[in-house]
Amino acid sequence: EVVLTQSPGTLSLFQGERATLSCRASQTLSSNYVAWYQQRPGRAPRLLIYDSSTRATGIPDRFTGSGSGTDFTLTISRLEPEDFAVYYCQQYASSLLTFGGGTTVELK
Amino acid sequence: EVRLVESGGGLVEPGGSLRLSCVASGFTFDDYVMHWVRQAPGRGLEWVSSIIWNSGSKGYAASVKGRFTISRDNAKNSLSLQMESLRGEDTALYFCAKGPYSSTWTYFDYWGQGTLVTVSS
């Protein structure tokens, strides 16, 4: 099973600041098969990024995904009020799909 | 508009059974892989099971394999999860999710709002 480790666990930032979230895989992921999701309190997750760097439909360009191999990053260039949420990475290089433990982006 | 509506959750005793359902609309159901993903209270996301468009291939997480069975009825645009031998650790909000392809399970592009399963005596 591919284990995904997200860091930091919590990121405390001001509105307008840049957020950098990390996702590290326990083995090399072929074809950069990583997705990122946002989950606001009491809501279902929402797809942000797939194939490591492709934004999903309707996702603002302040969200950027990057990375390859075992190290992947989600960057939010300037935090808006609605961006304070939990973010999960997910790999689909293996047929046993797995998620990272999540990073909480909270308002400082 | 893609819509996924789950139902069937509730309180069940350890060792009991429950069947979850998900009705889909807003897309051609039999063109896509469908999934179940769960989230224990206050915890992260866990993939549970996936089924390709024609039910020809199914996948399960190790934690549920042999106890849960995924199925779909394309004529009724519905997805099901039959859960047997339930344990306390199965307590979670169960999400129905859609995949972007027909024959490969990858990421989840649309999600329902979830149905809560509580396993407790």
Image (cartoon, coloured by chain):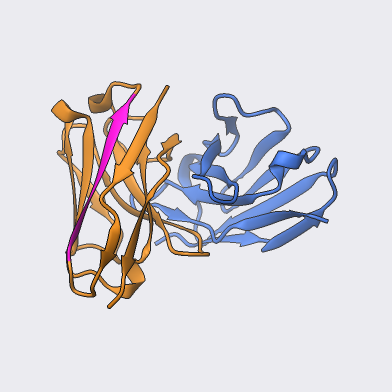
Chain colours: A blue, B orange
The residue depicted at 19 percent of the width and 42 percent of the height is: B57
- Please provide the residue range marked out in magenta: B17-25
| A44, B98: nearer the viewer | A44
Query: For residue B64, which quarter of the picture?
Result: bottom left
Given the current orientation, which residue lies at the most extreme bottom position? B121
Question: Which image quarter holds the N terminus of chain A?
Answer: bottom left
The residue depicted at 37 percent of the width and 40 percent of the height is: B97
Q: Looking at the picture, how far across and down is residue A102, in whole percent?
A: 58, 57
- A105 versus A1 height, above or below: above
Q: Looking at the picture, how far across and down is residue A85, in whole percent?
A: 65, 49
Q: Looking at the picture, how far across and down is residue B66, in whole percent?
A: 17, 64
Tell whether A12 sits left or right of A50. right
The residue depicted at 62 percent of the width and 29 percent of the height is: A59
Tell whether A19 sits left or right of B48. right
Tell whether B87 sits left or right of A64. left
Q: Looking at the picture, how far across and down is residue B26, in whole percent?
A: 35, 22
Secondary structure mainly formed by the magenta segment: strand
Query: For residue A18, which quarter of the picture?
Result: top right
- A105 versus B75 height, above or below: below
Q: Magenta span has A7?
A: no
